[in-house]
């Protein structure tokens, strides 16, 4: 069995110095992986509801950027896998996302595992300036761009949304 923990990135633990110390300690205790989540907004009462219509947990009101939190965890650890569960892939252009993830994988010396998704909160898309409609097709093409960037040879992609 492998055991992973969340990188302390939300609420009172969203302090980079404390979070780095906690990542180091979790690795020393033998954990196998450290994971981040992706939150852009934390409305008190999300119009679409949260986990069955409940109010958003107060801890989500303070949050560290997931990729920067992983970079901090990478610098504070040597062995553990580092991952996102899940990173909202559509809030930035796919080429920018590919560059950030590639850089993070290099910083971590190949320890990065990436989970990508669509998210669930319409308001986060609006705040990011990204259309809620068509997100499934955008995710498919984003994955195509990532595959092209991380594949062998010259990067070539011609799609409906990006070229």
Image: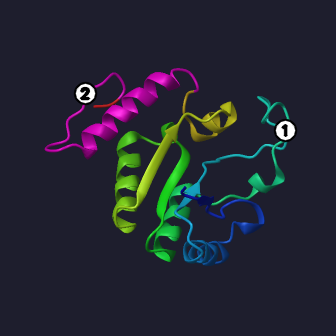
* Quadrant of the drawing holding the C terminus: top left
The figure's colour scheme reads rainbow
Characterize the local packing of mark 1: few (<14), some (14-19) or many (20 or more) Cα atoms within 10 angstroms.
Answer: few
**Residue projecting furthest to the left:** 153
Kindly identify which residue carries mark 1: 45
**Residue projecting furthest to the front:** 1
Which residue occupies 34% across, 55% down?
102
Which residue occupies 56% across, 66% down?
31
| Residue 5 percent coordinates (x, y) | 62, 60
* Quadrant of the drawing holding the N terminus: bottom right
Whether residue 77 is situated above or below residue 125 in the rendered picture: below
What residue span does the magenta drawing correspond to? 132-161
Query: Depth check: 108 or 91 in front?
Result: 108
> What kind of element bears circle 2?
loop
Mark 2 and mark 1: Cα distance apart in space: 40 Å
Dot placed on the residue nearer the N-terminal end, 2 or 1? 1
Whether residue 126 is situated above or below residue 96 in the rendered picture: above
| Residue 109 percent coordinates (x, y) | 34, 67
Query: Depth check: 69 or 109 in front?
Result: 109
Q: Quadrant of residue 6?
A: bottom right
Kindly identify which residue carries mark 2: 158
> What kind of element bears circle 1?
loop
Q: Is residue 2 left or right of residue 143?
A: right
Magenta-span inclusion, residue 141: yes
Query: Depth check: 124 or 113 in front?
Result: 113
| Residue 155 percent coordinates (x, y) | 20, 41
Magenta-span inclusion, residue 126: no
């Amino acid at each position: 069995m492998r055991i992973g923990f969340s990188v302390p990135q939300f609420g009172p633990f969203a302090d980079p110095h404390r979070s780095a110390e906690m990542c180091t300690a979790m690795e020393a205790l033998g954990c196998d992986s450290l994971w981040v989540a992706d939150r852009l907004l934390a409305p008190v009462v999300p119009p679409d509801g949260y986990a069955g219509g409940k109010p958003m947990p107060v801890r989500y009101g303070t949050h560290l950027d997931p990729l920067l939190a992983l970079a901090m965890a990478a610098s504070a650890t040597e062995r553990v896998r580092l991952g996102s569960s899940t990173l909202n892939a559509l809030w930035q252009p796919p080429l920018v996302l590919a560059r950030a993830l590639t850089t993070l994988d290099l910083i971590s010396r190949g320890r990065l595992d990436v989970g990508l998704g669509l998210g669930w909160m319409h308001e986060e898309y609006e705040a990011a300036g990204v259309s809620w409609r068509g997100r499934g097709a955008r995710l498919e093409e984003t994955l195509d761009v990532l595959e092209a960037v991380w594949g062998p040879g010259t990067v070539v992609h011609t799609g409906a949304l990006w070229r």
